[in-house]
Image (cartoon, helix red, strand yellow):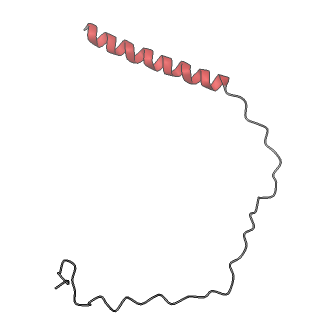
Amino acid sequence: MKARLSIVAGLIVGVAVAGLMLGGLLALTPDPPALASPTQPFVIVTPSPSPKVTIRPTASPSPSASPSALPGDDITS
């Protein structure tokens, strides 16, 4: 019976301490600043991309590679 009483007492004390801490935090926090008058939204201007886009052809695969060679095949002989 003593063990159950200590568990319940600890729970009650824990809840009380948590409430006191929360109340202290709320009491000690500074007041929010006064609402400022609405202003224009801040707009970031970025340069537009160039309309000329050149695409260079990619290099073709080297002709020395055998198209029938599979990974793991011995191609040295």
Q: Quadrant of the C terminus?
A: bottom left
Q: Is residue 58 left or right of residue 1?
A: right
Q: Is residue 21 left or right of residue 66?
A: right
Q: How many marks?
A: 0
- Residue at image point 71% right, 28% down: 30
Corner quadrant of residue 42:
bottom right
Q: Is residue 74 above or below residue 27?
A: below
Q: Is residue 36 left or right of residue 53?
A: right
Of 64 and 24, the residue lying toward us: 64
Q: Is residue 4 above or below residue 62?
A: above
Point out residue 12 in the picture as x, y percentages from the top left corner: 42, 16
- Residue at image point 60% right, 20% down: 24
Of 58 and 12, the residue lying toward us: 58
Q: Residue furthest front?
A: 77
Corner quadrant of residue 40:
bottom right
Point out residue 63 in the picture as x, y percentages from the top left corner: 34, 92
Q: Quadrant of the N terminus?
A: top left
Corner quadrant of residue 59:
bottom left
Point out residue 10 in the picture as x, y percentages from the top left corner: 38, 14
Q: Is residue 44 above or below residue 19?
A: below
- Residue at image point 28% right, 13% down: 4
- Residue at image point 36% right, 89% down: 62
Q: Is residue 24 above or below residue 5?
A: below
Q: Residue furthest bottom?
A: 63
Point out residue 22 in the picture as x, y percentages from the top left corner: 56, 24
Q: Residue furthest top?
A: 2
